[in-house]
Amino acid sequence: MTNTALVVSAHSADFVWRAGGAIALHAAKGWQVTVVCLSYGERGESAKLWRLPGMTLDRVKAEREKEARAAAEVLGVHDIQFWDLGDYPITLTNDSLFRLVDVYRNIHPGFVLTHSKEDPYNRDHPAVCEFAQHARITAQAHGHNPHQKVLGAPPVFLFEPHQPEQCGWKPDVLLGIDGVWEKKRAAIECMAGQEHLWEYYTRVAQQRGAQAARNSDRAIKYGEGYQSVFPHVVETLG
Amino acid sequence: MTNTALVVSAHSADFVWRAGGAIALHAAKGWQVTVVCLSYGERGESAKLWRLPGMTLDRVKAEREKEARAAAEVLGVHDIQFWDLGDYPITLTNDSLFRLVDVYRNIHPGFVLTHSKEDPYNRDHPAVCEFAQHARITAQAHGHNPHQKVLGAPPVFLFEPHQPEQCGWKPDVLLGIDGVWEKKRAAIECMAGQEHLWEYYTRVAQQRGAQAARNSDRAIKYGEGYQSVFPHVVETLG
Amino acid sequence: MTNTALVVSAHSADFVWRAGGAIALHAAKGWQVTVVCLSYGERGESAKLWRLPGMTLDRVKAEREKEARAAAEVLGVHDIQFWDLGDYPITLTNDSLFRLVDVYRNIHPGFVLTHSKEDPYNRDHPAVCEFAQHARITAQAHGHNPHQKVLGAPPVFLFEPHQPEQCGWKPDVLLGIDGVWEKKRAAIECMAGQEHLWEYYTRVAQQRGAQAARNSDRAIKYGEGYQSVFPHVVETLG
Amino acid sequence: MTNTALVVSAHSADFVWRAGGAIALHAAKGWQVTVVCLSYGERGESAKLWRLPGMTLDRVKAEREKEARAAAEVLGVHDIQFWDLGDYPITLTNDSLFRLVDVYRNIHPGFVLTHSKEDPYNRDHPAVCEFAQHARITAQAHGHNPHQKVLGAPPVFLFEPHQPEQCGWKPDVLLGIDGVWEKKRAAIECMAGQEHLWEYYTRVAQQRGAQAARNSDRAIKYGEGYQSVFPHVVETLG
Amino acid sequence: MTNTALVVSAHSADFVWRAGGAIALHAAKGWQVTVVCLSYGERGESAKLWRLPGMTLDRVKAEREKEARAAAEVLGVHDIQFWDLGDYPITLTNDSLFRLVDVYRNIHPGFVLTHSKEDPYNRDHPAVCEFAQHARITAQAHGHNPHQKVLGAPPVFLFEPHQPEQCGWKPDVLLGIDGVWEKKRAAIECMAGQEHLWEYYTRVAQQRGAQAARNSDRAIKYGEGYQSVFPHVVETLG
Amino acid sequence: MTNTALVVSAHSADFVWRAGGAIALHAAKGWQVTVVCLSYGERGESAKLWRLPGMTLDRVKAEREKEARAAAEVLGVHDIQFWDLGDYPITLTNDSLFRLVDVYRNIHPGFVLTHSKEDPYNRDHPAVCEFAQHARITAQAHGHNPHQKVLGAPPVFLFEPHQPEQCGWKPDVLLGIDGVWEKKRAAIECMAGQEHLWEYYTRVAQQRGAQAARNSDRAIKYGEGYQSVFPHVVETLG
């Protein structure tokens, strides 16, 4: 059976900066990764596009989707979905919740990636964190669409916010991504509208790589940090 | 090369209640587990023995050592050491620190188990937690006994204190121990002086087992909880 | 004047596992305890029922109500109400809020029991915690139904979630329930649909009992833990 | 260019007790301070008025507005607005959000004052804290009313709640207000409906003043405490 | 049998500002309260005395003892002891530890009062907090002076530090002290060397009183706040 | 009168990585900055030197001092002191404490920089944090060397540890250091023995610079982060 993973991204670029390495790494191992972009980030994360003359909301969205699709292609994403729920603020209804429950039940992901619990700079991110977990819990309920196979207990990892300490985010998992770094960098460069972040997130990868090396005594140059929501159930500590 | 692990136990019974499952599990897989009992717990954790007529400190210690050796035998401990450093309060000098550094460098453990950071009911436990980590850091220093191979970065897991919530202890690792539960129970029953704790820690194992099952969607009946000190460096999230 | 207490339970079995001892204890002392079950837990906490052939939502609800009524009877509950607000997710409107305000003002409870503030495994529980407190605050407002006697300042205690450490829940009150344990166990056994939890919550009671004994130097075998929301106002520390 | 500041107050008296000193101090330096009173606090914070015979909601609101306008006058408030959004609970819609975004963009405040993140005694306060920050973030979004100048990054300070420790509020900024204390006291005395709080908040000012003196080795008698939301960007540490 | 209580005070005035109400209240009810002043606070808390011409360490100590004895007399302290262990920094040896263990075992206190766990302004206070609890734990050990009756499990309450929020101190117990306020104020006035604190701590009592009133819906004017170390074991929640 | 500042550095390179920008910035403004290197870091932070053939402890220390002096020269340090107290573990006696008290009283620093409160990777750092604050408190005591002018209340800032999130370190002050970045980089390059850290700490400066820009809406490229110990006493919030 094919392994699957689910990434719930508030805005259409978040999955690249924050989880591009994990996506490429698992895709390369044959995992089918589904990315749900709940909004395009068209209002709050598209400053450069809005500075162009004659820009409209629809053109911003179209541009953002094009960039995200290109990045997804580079990373080996299996399925990328754009739900266009708006941003700043994002609108998260029960209808969207049940739609996400359907995604969970369709793919039965082996793990889930989403945003941090807090972010004083960004209200959509914590809202999506809560939403993604809410859908996961609902997908576990036997009484929701009783004829379906309920979701098990996939681990949830929260990816790195822009200013980690200000968000109370503490990485307890460090993923080495050396083997796919070139892909992540290429995906980052698809984000033409946010070029000011390319080097910032490259440095993030280098710092997390150096920390992964230090915490494992192994040679690692690029990394991604994650914060677990649930305890790890293991069969050995070594 | 043989895998090794190190357990740093404040009193001579702690390794049984708190880490007996992990010890037996890894021993069964061929790991060589070293247990350092820094004290016998002769003053603070031997109430039942002290109620016997004519009891002396030496007799308590002898009895405690006998019990711990029997438990270690059952669990498959490779090497158990009794350092007799006193308890309530334990005395942790630099000499003992460097002795523990030597242990780290002799066995190069794949992981380390020790006490929680806080415990308002027990001052020796947090002191030993700090001591075990201090020795680990010193063992990593190139300038300490410069001719030796320095320690890498073994993960440290803090085992469960008696009243977990009061100690600010939160398990982020749950270890299934069904396969060795009978051994852990047998080791527990070696602790004749603390019979009042047998059922208590059996229930702890059952609760952690039920939680491990719930967090993994797998059938697990007995478990042990651990709190990680350092981030996990991983090669996959699945 | 009769003493009264209020238990706000998200799903129809929560009051049994989490507060059955407190309910029976105070009922036995003549308190009138009102239990509000906001939902039946028909979707998210009725797995066993859903596995029966031909099960429908209405039958699940009916079964859950029957079980809860039986348990309430055993515990000596004065008034149990089923508001049928749905679950996974529960729907908490302003209408329900004002209805709960009315309950507060009708009974003027001496204390209030409800869920923990956080629970990554269950979104309804923290939502109900917030809701129960919101209603309490509104019941204190002089401008809400100005002709009524406003609520005083009853203490609020949060009962134990399923995996306490994962919910950031720390008990600061331990209630000995030896005298009513048989009743609590009998009430637990009314929950035929969740038989897998009977032993789990029996062990919870035993662990809290052992801890109550240790923190008081008294003989206590069964207990319940609670986390206070507000400071205790006392007339003596002894 | 004139300096401006924005105070977002849940109920019409909050800005007086909690930020009256900061308002008067900056007004005296030529700052234009805008105060938005989202509600009158007519239901939850007007107990004394409701005890008067024949009182109605409209009369309470009128009285509250009169008091607040008088206080604002004393403090030198540039613009005070009453949005009448209700209280206990306050109703915060997207329409109100965008209206507050407009205020941000109209005045481009140099700093923002609002409520604490938590308050177990008052649900409106944390809701307004979140609301004020949400509006600030939205005002920074280039895609919101794209033709307007977006908001920069004004610091946000959370003023003191009624029972600071119970609200997890920790002051990291202490403002000396000796020069305007008389004005703050005069504004406090405009709040005829809450006379029981006059001395309480005078003592708060004295305690914060004594603490400001102790933390600076300067002579300060009256103070206000604030908790920063964002890091301070500085050009010198001295 | 007479009820007893133990107050462990770092410097000779701490028991007055921080616990004078509790002492007087329990003394008035017939409790025998023992106060151990570990140091005189002669170096760090006697600024006014040091400004007098020709002052010496011995004269400061003598003056501090005189003041403390007078205050103890007013409060009805049963036994006040001055251990003269130095201050800034205080010196806490194992000898002093065992001496304090003896006090615990001699009086078997019904409760214990001491300092907060943290205080960035005062290093002696947290050191004494740890010391007082360490002695309590040692007094519980059956192997310490095996012929003696071991200590039970008296609750420990941490009294209020000078700047509570900066010390991470949160009161979860509020004690009404109206009946003995005059005594506490009189004891405060015995502290001639720290006159600048008289009004400060009077205001502290008024604020805690107002908060006690608000949390209980009872008329209370003066109070003291305490933070519990251990869970309360209770027989009723009402 | 000349402004002064004090940097308390556990090992002889810490002041460079962690506070080089602040030192150069204030030096350039005429501040006299004193740096106390409590140890050389000769055992724990000199791996590269120890790999050279025939290396001895004395040669490592000499090399480390040479590097640190060169860096201090570049940064414009007024006075650098090497106390040679050992490392891994550092030895912090009362004699050293009083020596540091003398430094405080000699220079009366306008602010103090030192290590973070926690660091699971490095025991010396938190020990020095505590030591530096302990000396500060002692320097404030009127009874310590009673003839001297006591210390006021200089703010203390904790500089950035190697893995900030793992140390519970949260920057609440961001210092722009663009004007002195070249000097900081040159000082970093004096640390020949730790070349692997040059780029790491350059990236740290870039990330903190980007964050300073984002939090202030100003153009800042390089920064340093600090965590305050005490509240800021201010005269304006703007």
Image (cartoon, coloured by chain):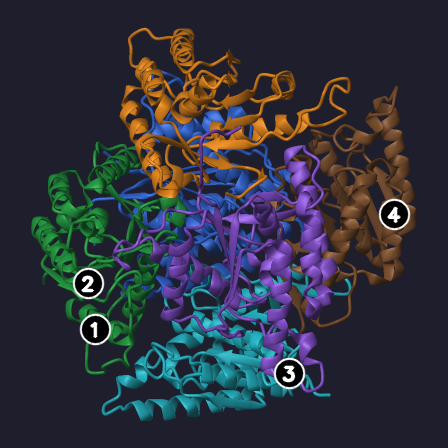
Chain colours: A blue, B green, C orange, D brown, E purple, F cyan
Of badges 4 and 2, the one in the foreground is 4
In which quadrant of the rendered view does residue F20 lie? bottom right
Q: In which quarter of the image is the C terminus of chain D?
A: bottom right
Q: How far separated are the C-alphas under marks 4 and 2?
A: 68 Å
**Co-location on one chain, circles 4 and 2:** no
Q: Is residue A13 above or below residue F84?
A: above
The image shows residue D35 at horizontal and vertical percentages of 82, 45
Q: In the rendered structure, are the residues bearing label 4 and label 3 in contact, judged by CB atoms less than 8 Å apart?
A: no
Of badges 2 and 1, the one in the foreground is 1
Q: Residues within 10 Å of mark 3 (few under 14, many from 20)?
A: many
Left or right placement of residue B113 versus residue F211 in this view? left
Res C151 visible? yes
Left or right placement of residue B4 versus residue B112 in this view? left
Left or right placement of residue A140 versus residue A194 in this view? left
Residue that carries the numbered disc 3 in the rendered image: F108
The image shows residue A206 at horizontal and vertical percentages of 41, 64
Disc 1 marks a residue whose amino acid type is: Arg
Residue that carries the numbered disc 1 in the rendered image: B99
**Chain letter of the residue carrying label 4:** D
Q: What residue do we see at 71% from left, 68% from top?
A: E192
Q: How crowded is mark 1: few (under 14 residues within 10 Å), some or many (20 or more)?
A: some
Disc 3 marks a residue whose amino acid type is: His
Q: How far separated are the C-alphas under marks 2 and 1?
A: 15 Å
Label 2 or label 1, whichever comes before in sequence order = 1
Residue that carries the numbered disc 4 in the rendered image: D187
Q: Residues within 10 Å of mark 2 (few under 14, many from 20)?
A: many
Residue that carries the numbered disc 2 in the rendered image: B109
Instruction: Please identify the residue farthest to the front as the structure is shown.
Output: E1
Disc 2 marks a residue whose amino acid type is: Pro
